[in-house]
Structure formats: C-alpha cells, structure tokens
Amino acid sequence: MCYYRRVEIEQSYAHFHRLLSKMLEQLIKEGETLWLGKEGHTFRPDYEKNTYNKAIYIVSGLGPYRDALHQLEQLQKQVMLETGVSKPYTGILLPKVLTGVTRIRLNTRINWVSERLDKGRTLSRLKKIHKAAQNNLEEFAKHRYLFDPAFDKVEADVKEVKRVLELVRSEPEQEYRYRTCQEFRNPYIYQGQQAASAYVLNHGLIAVGRQVVVERQPAYRRERQDKVQAPLLFENRFNRLYREVDWQRAKDAQQSKLHMNSV
C-alpha cells in the first residue's frame, strides 16, 4: 500500500472516531446512560486509540443524533472502500440503534476469575491494590465526619493490604492463586411485548423510547458444588489471594469428596 493511500485511510479512521466520541459525549450528557461494566470512555487525540466501554444510551428521540449517525455511516463506507473490505470491522462499527423501546432489564452476574501468579507478579498486584486503597483513604479523609466508622473500615483495609504485602514479601519463592471479582450486566430490551437479550459492543447501543423503564436485578445463579474452600491469605470485596499449594490441596480434596458422593 502506497504512503498517500495509507494516510487517507488513517485520516478517515481518525475522523470517524472524532465524530463518534463527540456523539457519545452528547448522548451521555443529554440522555440516560447504563454502563454494562467499567464506567466512562477515554477519548484521546487524533491517531491515538480511544478506549470505549460498553453502554446503553437511552434517549427519547433520535433527532439530535441523526446527522452524526449519517456521517458515521458514510465514513464507515469510505474506510471500507479504502481498505478493500466487504464488511465493517470492529474499529468502524456504528452504535446499534433500537427504536420503540419500552423497558430495559439488567441482570447482574458475578463471576470470579482465577490466575496463577509467581511471587513477583503477586507482589506487583498487591502493590496496585494497596495504592488504590491508600488513594481511597486519602480521598475519604477530605470529606469524612469526626469518628466516622466508614473511615475506620477504609483505614483497616489499607492496613490489611499492607500486612499481606509484607507477608508475601517475606515468604520463599512460590506460586499464588489470585482471584478477582468481575461484574457482568446482561441487558434484556423490550420493544412492546417483544423482549430479547441484547449483545452490546464497545461503541454502544442507542435505545430510543419515551419513558423507558429500567429494571436492575441480580441474575439467579445456583451455588456450584465444586467450589474450592482453601485458606485465604487476603480478601476484600473484589480480590482474594491464596497460596497455590493450599488451593490445589483444597481442590483435590473437594474433587475427591464429589467423586465419593457420586459413587
């Protein structure tokens, strides 16, 4: 591909994301935004990659956004023509638009993701948790009431992370089992009497409707029978840490118990 053609593609791509970011900012400002995971977008200068997080934008009408959507559609076609692709790829997908929306139901699902980490990576992870907890404590201190029990809880969290950080640092080289909590929100969108699970990409979904009702409820999840019960080194709302040897021992014992019950 010649230099000038590559420059044309980059310019079209940058203009696409410039318009997209402006439209998303307008949607967030003027409508109701339902974040499906991490909240907020990060918009960067031209030729730098933006960070988009999944969201549903609820608006009463599509009028203020029609021109931007039309321009985005034309730019999408232009980039596809310049790159020689027949279908739009992830970077140039338009926000999905659904009209006649009456209700949105958000089911929340909690899932624990597990990793095996060596000592160095475990210390690095704990340092990040400690820094976040320390920043939270400093921010809390600016607005707390005298003898605020909530402040004492945040302060205790900082001390607990520091304790386990020093503990891991003093232990011999070994592996650890680190688990982090991830929250997923699965949207179901009602258009009149019809309802369907909506698959939302990072560029989002625009739900158009008057007086859209939003329901938030946790999804039903049956407790797993093979849940591992190992001695914890550290636990807070979103993180758990175990020694890998303790984790494997508990896992083997649980599997043996399940096998005996099935015989």
Image (cartoon, grey):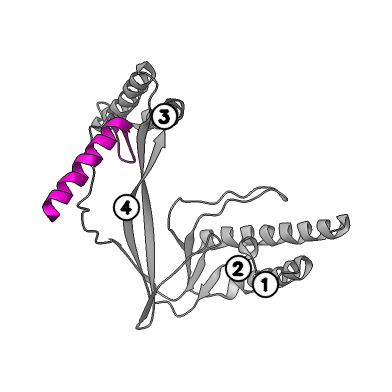
Q: What's the mark number on residue 110?
A: 4
Q: Is residue 253 magenta?
A: yes
Name the foreground residue: 218 vs 145: 218
Under circle 3, the secondary element is helix
> In the rendered structure, are the residues bearing label 2 and label 1 in contact, judged by CB atoms less than 8 Å apart?
yes
- Bounds of the magenta span? 234-263
* 8 left or right of 109 in image: right
| Foreground: disc 3 or disc 1 | 3
Q: Is residue 142 magenta?
A: no
* 151 left or right of 116 in image: left
> In the rendered structure, are the residues bearing label 1 and label 4 in contact, judged by CB atoms less than 8 Å apart?
no
Which amino acid type is shown beneath numbered disc 3? Thr
Q: Earlier in the sequence, mark 2 or mark 1?
A: 1
Under circle 2, the secondary element is loop
Give the labeled residue for mark 1.
Answer: 73
Distance in Å between CA atoms under marks 3 and 4: 23 Å
Under circle 4, the secondary element is strand
Q: Earlier in the sequence, mark 3 or mark 4?
A: 4
Give the labeled residue for mark 2.
Answer: 94
Which amino acid type is shown beneath numbered disc 2? Leu
Choose top left, top right, bottom left or bottom right for residue 36. bottom left
Name the foreground residue: 173 vs 234: 173
Q: Extreme front residue here?
A: 263
| Whether residue 202 is situated above or below residue 166 in the rendered picture | below
Instruction: Kindly identify the residue that appears in the image at 55 percent across and 54 percent down.
Output: 52
- Label 1 neighbour load within 10 Å: few <14, some 14-19, many 20+: some
Distance in Å between CA atoms under marks 3 and 1: 46 Å
| Whether residue 126 is situated above or below residue 78 in the rendered picture | above
Give the labeled residue for mark 3.
Answer: 122
Q: Earlier in the sequence, mark 1 or mark 4?
A: 1
